[in-house]
Image (cartoon, helix red, strand yellow):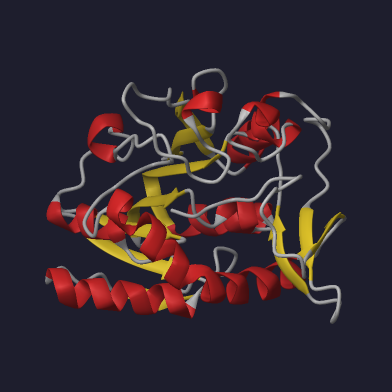
């Protein structure tokens, strides 16, 4: 599970400039891979306890797969996690009797995965790669999922969804969680300032961070509306089974980026799509 930064991010280093412009898939990938390499240590130190070494959380609200049941029966199933990070979710899949396999764009995240493999004794085979070019045979998985992972960082989303359809067996399950698209309209602030819409929900121009000294793009996040997601999934042969919008639970006081009780009690922060590929 990853942390996103939507427009008007309040806690950027002073050496980063923020822009909104079109970005290619290659440029987006070149930015986000090294960014996650730089951020991986801090991410695991900050969020590792919440995620659990063997745990499956769909988003900052803390909705677990055990509660959601989005993936269905896992025993005996081959399961691919796209944007697997340190492999926490895939380890949980393995404890349920599935064969969990991970892929991530960040080598440093995969190094953390290997560390936790050794610490827990529950290894997850993981590879370095991208959602738009999955290095697996056609129809080789029963389930593909992404928990707040790769998809909102992908420019060529059509290619990523088509690749998912390619590696899934007919009738297979594809489930993924993303920042709720309505959040695009609001500043990424966990306090009251994050409750006032400041830009158009329908403006799909990517959010871009650049190093002003080198001009190198260091982070990119992409936005699609709910309708964009539904149309793309349908056009690629997926049937929408469910769309979950987790409510902020009682007693959950954790702040994660722009996610907090202040915002979560009023507006959705996460969208969890559950789909099946046409048989």
Give left or right: position of 116 versus 138: left
Where does the C terminus fall, quadrant-wise?
top left
Give left or right: position of 154 versus 168: right
Q: Is residue 249 above or below residue 233?
A: above
Residue 42 in percent (x, y) is at: 46, 67
Query: 247 or 92: nearer the eye?
Result: 247
Q: Is residue 12 above or below residue 211?
A: above
Q: Is residue 168 above or below residue 196?
A: below
| Residue at 51% from the left image edge and 38% from the top image edge | 238
Give left or right: position of 25 versus 123: right
Residue 157 in percent (x, y) is at: 66, 53
Give left or right: position of 63 versus 193: left
Query: 233 or 102: nearer the eye?
Result: 102
| Residue at 30% from the left image edge and 54% from the top image edge | 89
Query: 247 or 262: nearer the eye?
Result: 262
**Residue 135 seen in this snapshot:** yes
**Residue 84 seen in this snapshot:** no
Residue 117 in percent (x, y) is at: 21, 73
């Amino acid at each position: 599970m990853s942390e996103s930064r939507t427009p008007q991010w309040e806690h950027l280093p002073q050496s980063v400039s923020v822009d909104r412009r079109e970005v290619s898939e290659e440029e987006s990938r070149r930015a986000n891979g090294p960014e996650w390499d730089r951020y991986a240590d801090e991410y695991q130190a900050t969020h590792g306890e919440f995620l659990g070494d063997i745990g499956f959380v769909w988003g900052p609200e803390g909705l677990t797969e055990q509660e959601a049941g989005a993936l269905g029966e896992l025993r005996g199933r081959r399961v691919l996690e796209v944007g697997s990070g340190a492999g926490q979710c895939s380890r949980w899949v393995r404890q349920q009797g599935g064969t969990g396999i991970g892929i991530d764009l960040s080598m440093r995240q995969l190094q953390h995965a290997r560390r936790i493999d050794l610490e827990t004794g529950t290894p997850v085979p993981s590879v370095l790669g991208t959602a738009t070019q999955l290095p697996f045979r056609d129809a080789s998985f029963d389930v593909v999922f992404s928990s707040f992972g790769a998809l909102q960082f992908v420019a060529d989303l059509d290619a990523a969804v088509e690749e998912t359809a390619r590696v899934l067996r007919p009738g297979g399950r594809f489930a993924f969680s993303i920042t709720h698209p309505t959040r695009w309209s609001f500043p990424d602030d966990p306090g009251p300032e994050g409750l006032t819409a400041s830009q158009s929900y329908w403006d799909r121009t990517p959010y871009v961070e650049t190093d002003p000294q080198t001009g190198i793009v260091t982070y990119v996040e992409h936005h699609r509306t709910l309708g964009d997601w539904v149309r793309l999934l349908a056009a690629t042969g997926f049937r929408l089974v469910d769309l979950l919008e987790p409510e902020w639970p009682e007693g959950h006081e954790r702040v994660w980026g722009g996610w907090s009780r202040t915002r979560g009690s009023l507006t959705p922060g996460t969208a969890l799509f559950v789909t099946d590929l046409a048989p």
